[in-house]
Structures are given as structure tokens and as C-alpha cells.
């Protein structure tokens, strides 16, 4: 399972440029379900189970990750960029990037020695990518405006945890692939959606196509269980299982679904802070409205190239998804 | 090994405090060409005998910037102190290597999005905790006093630019090793002493004892200086790919610079010059005041993103610097009259 997650995470695919992620996923799932790709690039899968589902259930994960888009090139060949998705500039300075998965570059900055004591305290700004060329023409031979860049980092195991880029939301993709391969009790829909990080856009059209009765958004959420953060601001804690949301900035969740998960007996925890959002925000407003819940991986340093997730929490998420899928598809939720 | 291979091998090994992997490897390579010894302070010294009883000391520092662990909490978060000058703004979410009982990877905490007010302050290293993700177990593996280093591996950029950690001053060390290789095959007019000194980033420390024990007649330090980049004023930087930087300063010896410049011109070796008004913040500052004083100069390699783990240099600058120093030494130095 970790090997599959590693492969998923190491593919570069920022919002609007998810093609390589989608190709990889299709190759994994094509023998296990029917699928189609919609006009935005969402993969909409239908898996036939042993039993016909009483209620139509859709499980969703997004394929895109946060990254950078090249917006201009200076005369001397440095690339200027905009952030795609929410990124803290302090997590970009002096990092290695790859443009279009092939051209290496570095997010450069003023050397420490030349910073004024004021500058040393402030978040870096006016960032640029240095690919080692001397002119705009030389740069244009290697990259084009609108190209994607992604901060590179290794996938590593740290004790019980994994450290990687793109855990948000390749963990969700991993879980969907796992369910498509292994879960066969009831029919269900699985959607691998694009453009979550730029406003939950893929999920809108995917939910329209699938038109489910119930939906589960499978994503990552901030685990602020780190040094210096008070208990009430931690959102969720690593190692205590999947985080289940009652409310975030995009959705007030279906209370019956939330309660069913929290009382399932499977190790899980409430997402105990109203912050962030995920595809549920788009899905629950689709058609006549969809009863929706969110199951998330507690993730430290989310939206950075070195995010950390506990593998036990991923196992909890899979168990909880299977449990909820059975309960919902069989019509056993009021 | 060619210059690039040597740079990659040495930069991906570390040298900070009691971690001496890079120094050990450099010592092993240097011993193929010169008589070597390690001194009490972990300096590596190599010696090539020449005709005259006159010694030129070539110095580059082998140590690098990093961190040292000062506290380990119950939840696996480390407090560290910096070793050398580090840009704290670039630490959040960076992964680093902790040289503990077993080497582990850890990640500096970044501000969780819901707690960020867009106005983070990066003024105190002790506030930026380092996450081992090991929880309670961290205390069994990590000890106070363990060193922490960057871990970026080297990679190629366009043209002949390369990127990696610790190029400051592994690039200088690579030049010394390349020179030792070239000079070991030649008949030398003067003795050449190679000093790979430690502790530069903490106040030019290793060079103090290295210069004392070598007691040279003249010396040249090889270090890095600011390369051209969008954030650095042109007058404070040198362009990558235009050769080594011959540095002028009140504390440096002009006659060495003049001879270096003449040799560069006669042989069409690219070089640039940089002028500073006082101390250079390199080993040259200490070597020049060793014992009764040593006539000393400084040649630098232009480097972008200094003290980050993505330092960038041009390989041609290293080759040109070696060409220049090789000719200079074969010409017998400057005071060997």
C-alpha cells in the first residue's frame, strides 16, 4: 500500500495539470470498474458489487496538488510565478522545483548575509525560479508561460509516519483505488476529481454526473498537534484515526452521517475546529442537494512539500469508508 | 574523479562538529597526491615538497553551516540552535537530517494555515521546532548536542550550473584537491601546503591553528562570494561563469593579486575582481595575522543562495580558478626571490 502511495505522491500534478496522475490512476483501476473521463478530466468510476445499492453512494478524492504556475520570464531568464492553491511563501524559499516534470530549478533569494535585520524577520516575497540560464530566450527554449512547477521532495518513512509532497490528496486517491480493487459488497461510485485546490471545481461536475444520494469526500486536513499550539487549536491529532468533520468553511455536514461515523467503533476523531474546506462544499450543493460527509487524514505541514501523515490514520480511514459505504448503500441510515 | 563528480561526492557528505565524513573523504583523496596529516582541531593538512625552502599555503574550509539540538520534548519535537548563519525564513517545512544514534529525517514546523495571520515572524530559532514524527521515542534516538544538517542532494541546472548544499566551501576544497592532483605530477619550484580547515562558519577557527602550524611564506584562501542574482546589487556580486574572483582589500596582499592578474591575462584565463573595504569574513582574515603575519590573498567562487541547501555555482569557474592557481604556483609564488 505504501508503495502505491509513494508512486502516487511522486507524480507532479497541480490543479489544471492532473493528466499524469489521472493516467496512472486509470491504469490501476481499469480492470476493476467501469469508468469515464468527463470534460474537465475527472475520472468517474462505477463499481458493480454483489448487491445492488439501495442508495447511490459516491466517494470522492481529488487528484490535484498545490504548486506554482509560470507567469513571466525576466530578461535575464528568471521565471516569475503565481501560487496555485494556498501556499505559505516561507515554505518555498530555497527549495528545488521541477517544471513540467523535467526542468530542474531553484527558488532563489537574497543570501542571509545581505538581509537587513528587519528583512530577516519577514516572510520572503518576490520569489523567482532560477533554472541556470542567462536570458529569456534561453529560458523559453526550456519552459513556456503557463507551465506548472512543483516543489520536489523525497517520500520517506519516519517511524509510524510518512513524509512526502502531495499527500493532500493522493491519500484519498490511494483509498479510492484500494476500495475499487477490494470492496465488492455493494455498487458504488468513485470520483477522482480535478481542480480542488482552486475552488472545488472538478467535484462540481463529477457530482452532477454521478448524481448520488450520499457522498463521502476523502481528503486531508490540518493536524496542528505540533509544539507551541494550544489544545483547542489543534484541529485533530495524528495517530487518533480519521478526522470526521461536523463543519468547515465550505460545509455544514449531514449530522446523521457524522454521528454514524463517530459511533462506528472504528478509531476516529472529530475535526475539532471550523477551518478549511474540501470537495464536500461543491458536492453537497449538487442537483437537489447531496447528503455529504468528510473523512480526512490528519496532516501536519499540509500544502508543503514535506507533509507528514501517520499510516495508522490511513488504515482507520479505509475501515471507516468501508463501514460507511455499507451502511449508506444498504439503506441503513435514516 | 572529475571536478563535478568530486563536488557532488564531497557536498553530499557532511562536516560539522564531530561529524567529519566530508573531511575524512577529502583526506583520503588528498592522500593519493600529497603527504597528509590531521591536526588536533580536525584540520586536514596536505604537503607537496618543492625545490625552494618556501611554502605557499592554500586554504579552503571543510565545515558547513547547520544546527545543533538543544532540547527534545515528550512529543518528539526538537529545539535547535544554528551553527553558522542561517536564514530562518526558509526553515518552515524544510526536511533535514539529524545525525543522532541512527540518522533520521525531521521536518521544521510550518505555521498551520488556520493559525497564520500572514505576518509570521522568523526572528528566533528556538521558536521554530523540528518535528521528528517519532513522539516519545525521539528521546531514545536523539541526544542533546546532536548535529543537524541540510540534506538536499546535488543536481544539474541548465548550462554548466550545478546546485546543492555545502558548496560553501566544498567548492574550494574541490579546487584544492584538483590542484593537488595536477601539481603532484609536476616538478614544483616551491612547497605547497593544502589546508582543509574546520570551524570557519563559527569564526574562522581552524585557519588560526592551520596557519600557525604550517608557518607559510605566503597564502591564498579559496572561498565563495556572492554570485549574481536578482536580489543582489550588481556591485556586491560577481557573475557566474566569468571565472574566479580576485579579491582586493586593505588586509590582503596586492602583489599576489597583481601576479595572479598578469598570469590570467597572459593565458586568457577568465577572472573577475571584487573590492571590499576591510576584513573579508574568510579564513584569509586569520591566516594573514598568524605568527609574524603572512602575505595573504583570497580568490572566491561566485555562489548564489549562499548558506541555503540550494547553492548554485558554475563548474567552469572551478576549472578556471584551478588553471590560474596552477600557473601561479608553477611560477614560484610572489616573494620567492
Image: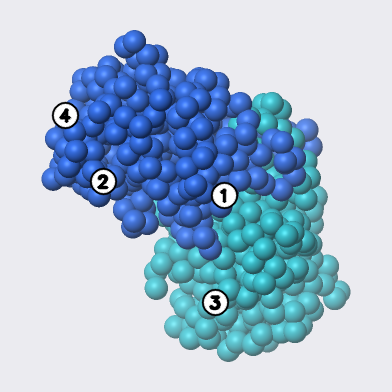
x, y percent for residue B156? 39, 52
Q: Viewer-proximal residue, A209 or B331?
A: A209
| Callouts 3 and 2 on one subunit | no
Q: Which mark is residue A36?
A: 4
Q: Which chain is blue?
A: A
Secondary structure beneath dot 4 equals strand
Q: Marks 2 and 4, Cα distance to the nearest angstrom?
A: 20 Å
Which residue has dot 1 on it?
A240
Q: Which mark is residue A183?
A: 2
Answer with mark 4 or mark 1, whichever residue precedes in sequence: 4
- Classify B133 as above or below B117: below
| Callouts 1 and 2 on one subunit | yes
Q: Residue at x 69, y 26 (%)?
A: B117
Q: Residues within 10 Å of mark 3 (few under 14, many from 20)?
A: many
x, y percent for residue B181? 47, 78
Front tag of 4 and 3:
4
Subunit bearing disc 4:
A
| Callouts 4 and 3 on one subunit | no
Q: Marks 3 and 2, Cα distance to the nearest angstrom?
A: 57 Å
Subunit bearing disc 1:
A
Q: Which chain is cyan?
A: B
Q: Viewer-proximal residue, A3 or B45?
A: A3
| Number of marks in the rendered image | 4
Amino acid at each position: 500500500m505504501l508503495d502505491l502511495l509513494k508512486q502516487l505522491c511522486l507524480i507532479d500534478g497541480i490543479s489544471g495539470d492532473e493528466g499524469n496522475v489521472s493516467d496512472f490512476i486509470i491504469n490501476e483501476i481499469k480492470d476493476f470498474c467501469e469508468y469515464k473521463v468527463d470534460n474537465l478530466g475527472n475520472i468517474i468510476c462505477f463499481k458493480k458489487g454483489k448487491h445492488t445499492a439501495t442508495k447511490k453512494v459516491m466517494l470522492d478524492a481529488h487528484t490535484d496538488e498545490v504548486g506554482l504556475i509560470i507567469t513571466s520570464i525576466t530578461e535575464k531568464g528568471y521565471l516569475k510565478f503565481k501560487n496555485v492553491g494556498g501556499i505559505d511563501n516561507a515554505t518555498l524559499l530555497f527549495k528545488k522545483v521541477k517544471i513540467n516534470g523535467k526542468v530542474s530549478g531553484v527558488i532563489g533569494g537574497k543570501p542571509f548575509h545581505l538581509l537587513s535585520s528587519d528583512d530577516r524577520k519577514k516572510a520572503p516575497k518576490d520569489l523567482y525560479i532560477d533554472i541556470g540560464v542567462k536570458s529569456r530566450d534561453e529560458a523559453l527554449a526550456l519552459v513556456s508561460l503557463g507551465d506548472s512547477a512543483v516543489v520536489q521532495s523525497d517520500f520517506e518513512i519516519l517511524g509510524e509516519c510518512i513524509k512526502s509532497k502531495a499527500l493532500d490528496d493522493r491519500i484519498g486517491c490511494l483509498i479510492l483505488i484500494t476500495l475499487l480493487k477490494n470492496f465488492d459488497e455493494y455498487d458504488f461510485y468513485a470520483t477522482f476529481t480535478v481542480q480542488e485546490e482552486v475552488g472545488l471545481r472538478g467535484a462540481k461536475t463529477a457530482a452532477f454526473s454521478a448524481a448520488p444520494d450520499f457522498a463521502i469526500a476523502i481528503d486531508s486536513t490540518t493536524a496542528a498537534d505540533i509544539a507551541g499550539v494550544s489544545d483547542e487549536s489543534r484541529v485533530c491529532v495524528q495517530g487518533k484515526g480519521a478526522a470526521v468533520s461536523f463543519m468547515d468553511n465550505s460545509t455544514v455536514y449531514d449530522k446523521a452521517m457524522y454521528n454514524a461515523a463517530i459511533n462506528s467503533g472504528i478509531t476516529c476523531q472529530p475535526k475539532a475546529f471550523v477551518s478549511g474546506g474540501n470537495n464536500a462544499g461543491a458536492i453537497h450543493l449538487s442537483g437537489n442537494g447531496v447528503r455529504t460527509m468528510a473523512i480526512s487524514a490528519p496532516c501536519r505541514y499540509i500544502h508543503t512539500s514535506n507533509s507528514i501523515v501517520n499510516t495508522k490514520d490511513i488504515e482507520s480511514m479505509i475501515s471507516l469508508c468501508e463501514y460507511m459505504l455499507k451502511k449508506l448503500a444498504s439503506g441503513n441510515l435514516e | 574523479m572529475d571536478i563535478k563528480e568530486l563536488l557532488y561526492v564531497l557536498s553530499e557528505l557532511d562536516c560539522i562538529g564531530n561529524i567529519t565524513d566530508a573531511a575524512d573523504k577529502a583526506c583520503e583523496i588528498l592522500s593519493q597526491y600529497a603527504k597528509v596529516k590531521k591536526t588536533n582541531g580536525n584540520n586536514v593538512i596536505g604537503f607537496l615538497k618543492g625545490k625552494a625552502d618556501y611554502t605557499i599555503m592554500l586554504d579552503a574550509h571543510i565545515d558547513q553551516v547547520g544546527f545543533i539540538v538543544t532540547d527534545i520534548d515528550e512529543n518528539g519535537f526538537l529545539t535547535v540552535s544554528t551553527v553558522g548563519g542561517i536564514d530562518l525564513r526558509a526553515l518552515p517545512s524544510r526536511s533535514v537530517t539529524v545525525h543522532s544514534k541512527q540518522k533520521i529525517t525531521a521536518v521544521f514546523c510550518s505555521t498551520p494555515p488556520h493559525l497564520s495571520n500572514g505576518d509570521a515572524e522568523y526572528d528566533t530559532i528556538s521558536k521554530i521546532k523540528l518535528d521528528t514524527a517519532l513522539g516519545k521515542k525521539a528521546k531514545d534516538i536523539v541526544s542533546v548536542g546532536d548535529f543537524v544538517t541540510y540534506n538536499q542532494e546535488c543536481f544539474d541546472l541548465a548550462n554548466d550550473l550545478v546546485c546543492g548544499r555545502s558548496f560553501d566551501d566544498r567548492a574550494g576544497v574541490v579546487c584544492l584537491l584538483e590542484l593537488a592532483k595536477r601539481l603532484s605530477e609536476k616538478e614544483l619550484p616551491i612547497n605547497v601546503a593544502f589546508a582543509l580547515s574546520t570551524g570557519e562558519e563559527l569564526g574562522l577557527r581552524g585557519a588560526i591553528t592551520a596557519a600557525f602550524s604550517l608557518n607559510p611564506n605566503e597564502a591564498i584562501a579559496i572561498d565563495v562570494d556572492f554570485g549574481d542574482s536578482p536580489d543582489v546589487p550588481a556591485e556586491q556580486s560577481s557573475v557566474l561563469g566569468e571565472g574566479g574572483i580576485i579579491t582586493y582589500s586593505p588586509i590582503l596582499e596586492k602583489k599576489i593579486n597583481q601576479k595572479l592578474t598578469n598570469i590570467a591575462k597572459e593565458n586568457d584565463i577568465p577572472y573577475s575582481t571584487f573590492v571590499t573595504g576591510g576584513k573579508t569574513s574568510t579564513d584569509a582574515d586569520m591566516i594573514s595575522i598568524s605568527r609574524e603575519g603572512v602575505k595573504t590573498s583570497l580568490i572566491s567562487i561566485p555562489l548564489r543562495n549562499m548558506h541555503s541547501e540550494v547553492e548554485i555555482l558554475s563548474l567552469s569557474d572551478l576549472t578556471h580558478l584551478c588553471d590560474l592557481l596552477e600557473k601561479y604556483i608553477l611560477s614560484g609564488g610572489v616573494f620567492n626571490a
